[in-house]
Image (cartoon, helix red, strand yellow):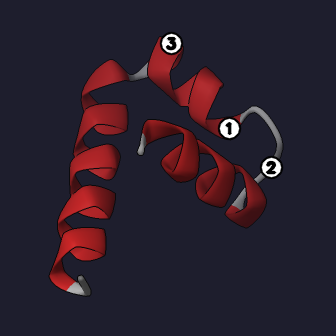
């Protein structure tokens, strides 16, 4: 699921955004990943 998050997020921003975010601001990365997962699961 993390691969899907990274693919979608990189498409929205720029290639490598999620990798950079995970290194520069791990808390924000986790928050955005959790938001993505919560939204994804709410549509299933």
Density class for disc 2 (Cα within 10 Å; few <14, some 14-19, many ≥20) is: few
Residue at 76% over, 32% down: 16
In space, the residues marked 2 and 3 are separated at their CA atoms by: 15 Å
Disc 1: which residue: 17
Task: Specify the farthest residue to the front.
Answer: 44
Residue at 47% over, 22% down: 22
Specify the label residue 14 is tagged with: 2
Specify the label residue 25 is tagged with: none
Q: In the image, 37: left or right of 12?
A: left
Q: In the image, 44: left or right of 15?
A: left
Looking at the image, residue 43 lies above or below residue 37 = below
Position of residue 4 measured from the top left corner of the image (x, y, whole percent): 55, 51
Q: Secondary structure at mark 1?
A: helix
Disc 3: which residue: 23
Looking at the image, residue 32 lies above or below residue 37 = above
Q: Secondary structure at mark 2?
A: loop
CB under 8 Å between discs 2 and 3? no
In space, the residues marked 1 and 3 are separated at their CA atoms by: 10 Å
Q: Quadrant of the N terminus?
A: top left
Density class for disc 3 (Cα within 10 Å; few <14, some 14-19, many ≥20) is: few
Residue at 58% over, 35% down: 18
């Amino acid at each position: 699921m993390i691969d899907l998050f990274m693919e979608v997020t990189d498409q929205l921003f720029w290639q490598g955004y999620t990798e950079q975010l995970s290194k520069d601001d791990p808390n924000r990365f986790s928050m955005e990943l959790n938001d993505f997962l919560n939204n994804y699961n709410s549509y299933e």
